[in-house]
């Protein structure tokens, strides 16, 4: 099995393997969240990570994320899985401290493969300023890898999903289309360079974007992952009690992603994301733009809502640091998500 591609052992890879958001919402509706004064963020409402206050100046940010392989390169798989988990801490305004591996692998695979996965993860954990300190590994016919991550944040500086206000501008810190590009690669339809660009984007931690954003005190932040831009925008809008307006022409896309979407490339996650968010989305966009907005992302960028009057300085700050930033819409009074 040493020559068997990792992706051939997985039914779905990356964040496209996420459990249906619609089913998850129904499942958690029957779950009674724990009540604790110091639990600042838990399940009511759920966010990108849990936050627990230790004292007036410190709170813990805790998250866990893992999935099957989405690329055949074991080191790249480990790096992407680690980035995806670490980014949950950055999406809460926190800084990662410590990570533990969560791994499931067939015994038939050479130990060198798992070693490469761990090496890729360790490199990204170090780049995030944290330490990979151990973990747990089990046998499984389908490989899976991810991290449990602990970080810290000031209790008064947590970035929730539920804080967007009318008059805010919406920004995105990474282009969309990782799911579409990966699916096209599996189907042999991705043009040269498309997969490499997607892998590079999925390696990118949201650390520098979060650091640049922190002085601007955003009203709401989330990272765009398996539920797609529209799924996460729906969560942000519904929990904030506002209406999110997104301009399809402003959506940034990875190289070839928009053309591939126009050619009909879709993932299974596209359907599940529509099941979750479609009833809350009004769309006047074309099929390709809709597909891009519903596409499940892995290790995607930050979706930011902050007062529009701070937008020009935010854009200048990101540009000065060579960081990607796209203004994609605005927040208004009302409810739901509109894709213009």
Image: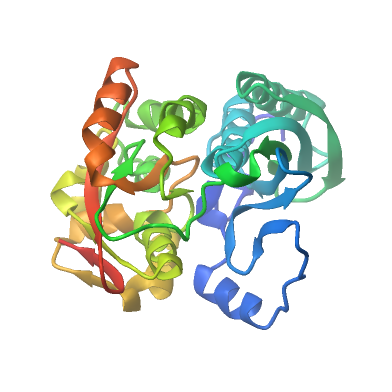
Q: Please say which color scheme the image uses.
A: rainbow
> Where residue 64 sits in the image (x, y, percent)?
70, 48
Report if residue 252 is visible in the image.
no
> Where residue 44 sits in the image (x, y, percent)?
62, 69
Does residue 7 sit above or below 205 in this rendering?
A: below
Does residue 186 sit above or below 324 in this rendering?
A: below
Q: Residue furthest front?
A: 56
- Residue at (72%, 73%) from the top-left corner? 33
Quadrant into which the N terminus falls:
top right
Does residue 241 sit above or below 15 in this rendering?
A: below
Report if residue 190 is visible in the image.
yes
Residue 321 occupies which quadrant of the picture? Answer: top left
- Residue at (61%, 40%) from the top-left corner? 89
Quadrant into which the C terminus falls:
bottom left
Residue 31 occupies which quadrant of the picture? Answer: bottom right
- Residue at (77%, 27%) from the top-left corner? 132
The foreground one among 3 and 37 is: 37
In the image, 92: left or right of 198?
Answer: right
Residue 252 occupies which quadrant of the picture? Answer: top left
In the image, 159: left or right of 67?
Answer: left
> Where residue 59 sits in the image (x, y, percent)?
71, 43
In the image, 81: left or right of 207?
Answer: right
């Amino acid at each position: 099995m040493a020559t068997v591609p990792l992706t051939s052992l997985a039914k779905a890879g990356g964040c496209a393997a996420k459990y249906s958001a619609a089913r998850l919402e129904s499942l958690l509706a029957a779950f009674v969240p724990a009540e604790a004064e110091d639990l600042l963020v838990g399940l009511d409402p759920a966010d990108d990570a849990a936050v627990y206050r230790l004292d007036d100046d410190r709170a813990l940010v805790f998250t866990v994320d893992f999935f099957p392989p989405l690329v055949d390169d074991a080191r790249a798989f480990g790096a992407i899985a680690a980035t995806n988990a670490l980014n949950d801490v950055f999406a809460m305004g926190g800084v990662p401290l410590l990570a533990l591996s969560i791994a499931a692998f067939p015994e038939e695979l050479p130990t060198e493969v798992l070693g490469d996965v761990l090496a890729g993860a360790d490199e990204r954990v170090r780049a995030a300023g944290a330490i990979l300190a151990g973990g747990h590994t089990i046998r499984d016919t389908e490989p899976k890898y991810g991290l449990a991550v602990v970080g810290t944040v000031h209790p008064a500086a947590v970035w929730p999903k539920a804080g967007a206000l009318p008059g805010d501008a919406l920004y995105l810190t990474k282009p969309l289309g990782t799911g579409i590009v990966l699916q096209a690669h599996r189907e042999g339809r991705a043009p040269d360079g498309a997969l490499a660009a997607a892998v590079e984007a999925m390696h990118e931690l949201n650390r520098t974007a979060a650091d640049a954003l922190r002085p601007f005190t955003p009203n709401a932040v989330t990272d765009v992952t398996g539920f797609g831009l529209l799924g996460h925008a729906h969560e942000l809008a519904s929990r904030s009690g506002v209406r999110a307006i997104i301009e399809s022409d402003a959506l940034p896309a990875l190289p070839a992603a928009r053309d591939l979407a126009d050619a009909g490339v879709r993932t299974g996650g596209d359907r599940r994301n529509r099941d979750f968010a479609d009833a809350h989305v009004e769309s006047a966009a074309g099929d390709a733009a809709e597909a891009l907005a519903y596409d499940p992302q892995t290790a995607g960028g930050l979706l930011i809502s902050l007062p529009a009057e701070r937008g020009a300085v935010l854009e200048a700050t990101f540009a000065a640091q060579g960081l990607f930033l796209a203004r994609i819409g605005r927040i208004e009074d009302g409810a739901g998500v509109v894709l213009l």
